[in-house]
Image (spheres, rainbow, N blue to C red):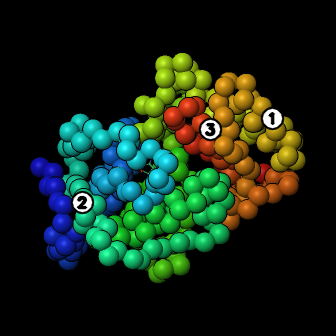
């Protein structure tokens, strides 16, 4: 039976007792509207640990006023069913009064990594993400935190936060789960019209195209980015960014070399979708 907690203190005390009895804890933070991407993280945690904890919290501090917080899907009943089917032990389901009481005044910022890629278009987004994840880590105190590669910048930022702030949690990065057509699963895919659903696989197609150009010898990022962007424009998607950066520090590069992250954000009307792939260039 899955137990549901709303109180940070109560779930913390319960989990601490389990840890004292040598149980290991795997933790998967989510914003709900669960899909097979979330499910893959939960399954990995289930394989690796005695206890699986999932949090479901639509964190307002990572959305700006003009973003989609008010329309973000909230199918709580079916989310709970999915979590029960996946044999999750504990669901942490706090409310905003508890997580951000009126006098809340602390935040965590992972400076340079948060100012590029998604951080350029969403200035306070990663401050909101880092702050809520650190709070959740204090509450749950897991052995391992499971994150998806779909949100690679987020994972890189959280790795840095954990290292800089001396948290001893391990981070496991799980591969991106995609539809058959290549579209990365996302809670935001419900915003796509049926016509846009046909077009949205262009995100992954363009990433693979840029990767293939690199593998065929192209090294100039200016040319690579132009070609990737042109492919997306043709499909009707609006490119917010398509960048080719060093995968360790997210710095842009003129010539691709080493571990390279190709990352993009594309808008189809209401839907802002992101995706990325890695390439290793010798
Ligand atoms: P979210 O609910 O969107 O905040 O996502 C919660 C976690 O699930 C994050 O670590 C995401 O990176 C991960 N995730 C979301 N979509 C996918 C996907 N398609 N494949 C793998 N992981 C994902």
Task: Tell me what residue is drawn at x 81 percent, y 35 percent.
Answer: 227
The residue indicated by pointer 2 is 94
Q: Are there few (<14), some (14-19), or many (20+) residues within 10 Å of tag 2?
A: some
Instruction: Please provide percent x and percent y for residue 60.
Output: 39, 56
Quarter of the picture holding the C terminus: bottom right
Q: Residue 227 bears which disc, if any?
A: 1
Q: Residue 242 appears in which quarter of the rendering?
A: top right
- Residue 102 appears in the figure: yes
Q: Are there few (<14), some (14-19), or many (20+) residues within 10 Å of tag 1?
A: some
Q: Residue 266 bears which disc, if any?
A: 3
Q: Residue 251 appears in which quarter of the rendering?
A: bottom right
Q: Is mark 3 within 8 Å of ligand 1?
A: no
66 left or right, relative to 227:
left
Task: Say which element carries label 2.
Answer: loop
In this rendering, is residue 158 above or below 3? below
1 left or right, relative to 192:
left
Q: Residue 268 appears in which quarter of the rendering?
A: top right
Q: Is mark 1 within 8 Å of ligand 1?
A: no
Given this view, does label 3 or label 1 mark the residue nearer the observer?
A: 3
In this rendering, is residue 84 above or below 16? above
Marks 2 and 1, the one that precedes in the sequence: 2
Q: Are there few (<14), some (14-19), or many (20+) residues within 10 Å of tag 3?
A: many
102 left or right, relative to 183:
left
């Amino acid at each position: 039976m899955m137990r549901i907690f709303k109180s940070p203190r109560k779930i913390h005390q319960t989990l601490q007792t389990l840890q004292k009895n040598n149980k290991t804890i795997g933790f998967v933070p989510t914003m709900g509207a669960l899909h097979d991407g979330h499910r893959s993280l939960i399954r990995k945690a289930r394989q690796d640990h005695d206890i699986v904890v999932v949090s479901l919290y639509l964190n307002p501090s990572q959305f700006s006023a003009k973003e989609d917080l008010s329309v973000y899907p909230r199918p709580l009943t079916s989310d709970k069913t999915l979590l029960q089917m996946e044999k999750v032990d504990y669901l942490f389901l706090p409310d905003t009064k508890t997580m951000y009481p009126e006098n809340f005044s602390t935040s965590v910022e992972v400076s340079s990594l948060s100012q590029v890629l998604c951080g350029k278009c969403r200035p306070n987004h990663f401050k909101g993400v880092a702050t809520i994840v650190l709070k959740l880590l204090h509450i749950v105190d897991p052995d391992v935190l499971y994150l998806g590669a779909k949100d690679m910048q987020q994972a890189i930022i959280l790795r840095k936060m954990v290292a800089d702030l001396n948290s001893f949690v391990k981070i496991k990065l799980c591969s991106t789960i995609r539809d058959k057509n290549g579209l990365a699963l996302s809670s935001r895919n419900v915003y796509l019209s049926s016509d846009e659903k046909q077009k949205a696989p262009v995100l992954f197609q363009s990433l693979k195209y840029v990767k293939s150009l690199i593998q065929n010898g192209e090294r100039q990022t200016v040319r690579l980015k132009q070609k990737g962007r042109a492919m997306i424009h043709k499909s009707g998607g609006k490119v917010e960014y398509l960048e080719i950066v060093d995968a360790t520090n997210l710095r842009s590069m003129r010539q691709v070399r080493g571990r390279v992250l190709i990352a993009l954000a594309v808008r189809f009307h209401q839907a802002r979708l992101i995706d990325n792939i890695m390439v290793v260039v010798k």
